[in-house]
């Protein structure tokens, strides 16, 4: 019999400011890495007030991580030190592997009504890939398959749903990244690798997970961490529900983290910031 994952932790995101003063909500961050391994952080930057996001995230460095940005409203312009540039809009994903070091900027722009919305997930890289060459992939909405059945609509960004596989993949993390919309009262079940980390970020409506009778409300966003199991289930409340479901294979590695850099040891972390001071942080130059 499948072992359905039970709710382990429910938390509301914490308001923070990042970049040049962008207001966002942090679902989880540095102090909770062991719970969410291989993921490091999840930020919710949905906003209806341009003054709270338009200053954006000017040029800044990253090393040792991947950043995964998913846009649901508005767009984000991107540029980086290896020559990539462009914009991602509603339904698009930007998957950036910082590797040995990259400097980039992300500048958000709202809709005609001033709305901006999306999520940025940080994933850790294993020690053997911390100093790999950086890379970037822009995944357009049209590349992301959608599966609909019995009141559930699932966008498959990474991992699988039924016979559909998402376009994003990482060999070490084996990620699952689904955007799930449930109609009022609809139920949905999904298979998960038993020992992978699994959590949901509920941002619309209400839902009960794992067969529990008590409904969880989205409020401004609600983070739900699950225990181990090889199956996941959800039933929407009277207003329906929309949530991100994320899974990944834990790395079980030491973490040394400061700001935009995540390494395995304090010595590696100090070396990264010495590289910044010396102007040698970017190891892979643009080929353009």
Image (spheres, rainbow, N blue to C red):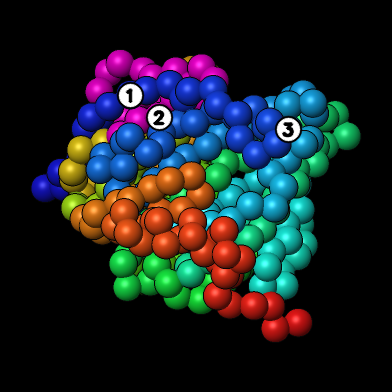
- Give yes or no for contact between labels 2 and 3 (Cβ–Cβ under 8 Å): no
Residue 43 x/y as whole percent: 52, 37
Residue at 85% in and 29% down = 113
Q: Residue furthest bottom?
A: 287
Q: Which residue is mark 3?
A: 53
Nearer the N terminus, badge 2 or badge 1?
A: 1
In the image, is residue 230 part of the stretch drawn in magenta?
no
The C terminus lies in quadrant: bottom right
How many discs mark residues in the rendered view?
3
Residue in the image at 31% along x and 36% along y: 32
Q: Would you identify the image quadrant in which residue 215 lies?
A: top left
Of 113 and 179, the residue lying toward us: 113
Mark in front: 2 vs 3: 3
Q: Residues within 10 Å of mark 3 (few under 14, many from 20)?
A: many
| Mark toward the start of the polypeptide (2 vs 3) | 3
CA neighbours of label 2 inside 10 A, class few (<14), some (14 to 19), many (20+)? many
Which of the 4 image quadrants contains residue 207? Answer: top left
Q: Which residue is mark 2?
A: 223
């Amino acid at each position: 019999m499948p072992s359905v994952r039970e709710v382990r932790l429910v938390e509301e995101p914490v308001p923070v400011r990042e970049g040049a003063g962008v207001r966002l909500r942090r679902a989880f961050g540095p102090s909770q890495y062991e719970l969410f391994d291989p993921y490091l952080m999840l930020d919710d930057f949905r906003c209806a007030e341009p003054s709270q996001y338009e200053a954006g995230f000017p040029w800044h460095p990253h090393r040792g991580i991947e950043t995964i940005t998913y846009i649901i409203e508005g767009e984000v312009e991107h540029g980086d030190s290896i020559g990539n540039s462009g914009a991602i809009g509603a339904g698009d994903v930007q998957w950036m592997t910082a590797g040995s070091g990259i400097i980039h900027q992300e500048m958000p722009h709202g809709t005609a009504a001033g709305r901006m919305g999306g999520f940025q997930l940080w994933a850790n890289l294993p020690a053997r890939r911390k100093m790999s060459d950086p890379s970037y992939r822009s995944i357009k909405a049209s590349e992301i398959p959608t599966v609909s059945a019995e009141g559930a609509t699932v966008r498959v960004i990474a991992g699988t749903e039924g016979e559909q596989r998402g376009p994003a993949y990482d060999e070490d993390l084996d990620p699952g990244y689904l955007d799930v919309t449930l109609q009022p009262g609809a139920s949905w079940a999904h298979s998960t690798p038993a020992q992978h980390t699994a959590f949901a970020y509920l941002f619309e409506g209400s839902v009960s997970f794992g067969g529990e009778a008590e409904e969880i409300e989205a409020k401004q966003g609600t983070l739900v961490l699950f225990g181990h199991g090889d199956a996941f289930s959800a039933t929407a409340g009277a207003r329906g529900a929309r949530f991100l479901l994320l899974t990944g294979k834990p790395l079980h590695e030491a973490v040394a983290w400061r700001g935009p850099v995540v390494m395995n040891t304090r010595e590696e972390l100090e070396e990264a910031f010495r590289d910044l001071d010396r102007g040698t942080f970017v190891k892979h130059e643009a080929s353009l």
